Amino acid sequence: MAKYERIDEETPNGGAYSEIFYLDDKHNVVDSGIAAQWVIRECTANGELICETWGEARGG
């Protein structure tokens, strides 16, 4: 399972790419299957952060 994913497509806020990190309750990066939360970061082509969105993972 992934701990990090990068999507090389234009983002809703005008970024060049987005990345998602899967986290546990203490903000340690973990596999997506056991994550308690996540953060999506939208970035410019040179890596500058435009927007960050946090959320909680829900069990299936």
Image (cartoon, rainbow, N blue to C red):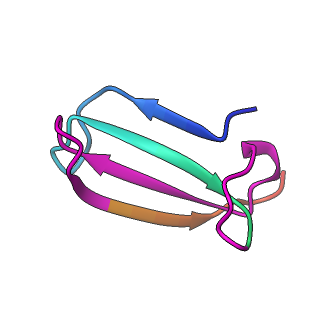
Is residue 21 shown in magenta? no
Q: Residue 6 at x, y = what percent?
A: 45, 32
Report the label total. 0
At horizontal 73% and vertical 64% (from top left) the residue drawn is: 24
At horizontal 71% and vertical 73% (from top left) the residue drawn is: 26
Q: Does residue 8 appear to the left or right of 49 in the view shown?
A: right
Q: Nearer the viewer, residue 27 or 7?
A: 27
At horizontal 50% and vertical 46% (from top left) the residue drawn is: 20
Tell me the magenta residue range.
26-51
* Figure quadrant of the N terminus: top right
Q: Does residue 35 appear to the left or right of 54 in the view shown?
A: right
**Quadrant in the rendering for residue 56:** bottom right
Is residue 46 shown in magenta? yes
| Vertical side of 60 occupied by 53: above or below | below
At horizontal 74% and vertical 55% (from top left) the residue drawn is: 35
**Quadrant in the rendering for residue 8:** top left
Q: Does residue 6 appear to the left or right of 10 in the view shown?
A: right
Q: Residue 31 at x, y = what percent?
A: 75, 43
Q: Residue 54 at x, y = what percent?
A: 49, 66
| Vertical side of 13 occupied by 10: above or below | above
| Vertical side of 44 occupied by 36: above or below | below
Query: Residue extending furthest top?
Result: 8
Q: Nearer the viewer, residue 15 or 12?
A: 15
Q: Residue 13 at x, y = what percent?
A: 20, 51
Query: Residue extending furthest bottom?
Result: 26
| Vertical side of 60 occupied by 3: above or below | above
